[in-house]
Amino acid sequence: MVCVPAVSGVFELDDARARQLWNWVLGRQGLADHRKFSSVADIAQASLGLHAARLPSPFATVLARSKTPDVALSIFSSDSRELVTTIRCMRKTLHTLPLPLAAAAHAATLHFRERDALRAITNAGISPRLVLRAVDAISGILVDGPLFHREIEERLTGPRRPVATVRLALKLAWERGSLSYVNDSLGWNREYRMFGLTKALYPELDMTVDRAKATGELVREYFERYGPATLKDVMWWSALSRTAVVTALAESGRDWVEMRTEWCDAPLYMYRDRLAEFEASEQQERVTGLNFLAHEDVALKAYFESRRRYLGALPAQRAFNQIGEVLPTIVQDGQVVGTWSWDVAKRRVTTSIARGYGSAELSREVPRHRERLTEALRAGWVEPLADGPSAIQR
């Protein structure tokens, strides 16, 4: 059995060189002034999706990578919604992805998400046949367009079909890809959870991609954006097996290099042509300046074993909460130096710089970034509805 990918070279990177490479990787994702993007779809493409398990995350993720705040506001537009879709995929969490990447992420991770949905049906003691009939009924009422999830429940629940059956059917159909989720809210702080037929909402989206093919594509797309990374990094990010990851690397048809850094003891892997691109880059492409990153930002969530690339000597609890989610962070040239949060009562951003990481430059720049972010978040805020739409179920 092949345990590691074949490489055409091994490189030792000192801390300075490794930091330059890390910033170059971040810059390619839009986290540098010279590489900002002008559309939600382009940002989702460059970052391999927007983490969407928390309502503010997609909006804040786009803000950090966009040329203007208007790009983030466009996340609620029909034009953007036609080009990206939100699915449960890597580690069974919600991600907003461009359609081709969504197809690969869906097919590569379907097996363990479908398993969980079927287990829930068994644990509930409900006949699978009744659930499948409910799936058909849901599809029938969605022919005319998407519906709010509570309306689906109300229309299909009856003496012979309890609400639990409808909910399990809705879950199974969504996991299998026949239904798609749409948040029809006009603001980042609210959710209006609707479901529609995938084939109607996204006629070009193929949710039946072969699992092996999709797995290979997903792993290779990960390294395209996030390499150098360790095998455990991509396994943790995707919840795929080591065998699946190594097989994908071997079948990529591209040369790989191995790297050794202070980030971790394990070897990291990267495409040789991407390393060559870095080596040919200008010095200004190897710095990213100050960034305010979202809760569970994809740039940080992409790694596990090699998190020292952005933590350095900073204690993990300064950047992660008690359940392992990365907090909204303040990052200077790839290093986490503090956190930020949204004060709901005052509707403004507050910041906290970690002890020992302050500087005159941060004292000047953080307030400016904080005010810009506050203004942008206020622009995307909507007042709660009277009926109180539910929060995303992670």
Image (cartoon, rainbow, N blue to C red):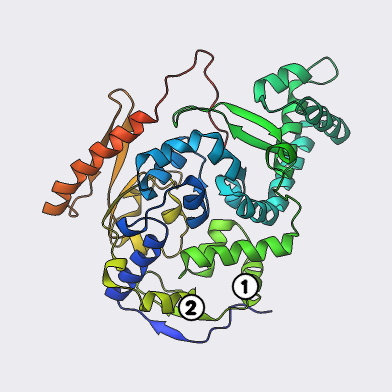
Amino acid under disc 2: Asp
Which residue has dot 1 on it?
246
Report x, y in % for residue 368: 20, 42
Q: Position of residue 390 (x, y in %)?
A: 55, 24
Which quadrant, please, contains the N terminus? Answer: bottom right
Q: Which residue is depicted at the point 37% across and 58% down?
A: 35
Up the image or down, 261 lies above or below 68; here it is below
Tag 2 secondary structure: helix
First in sequence, mark 1 or 2: give its number: 1
| Mark 1 or 2: the one toward you | 2
Q: Residues within 10 Å of mark 1 (few under 14, many from 20)?
A: some
Quadrant in the rendering for residue 246: bottom right
* Mark pair 1, 2: CA separation: 19 Å
Secondary element at image label 1: helix
Q: Quadrant of residue 128?
A: top right
Residue at x-position 31% and y-position 69%: 19
- The residue singled out by tag 2 in the image is 273
Q: Position of residue 46 (x, y in %)?
A: 48, 57
Left or right: 358, with 206 as reference point: left
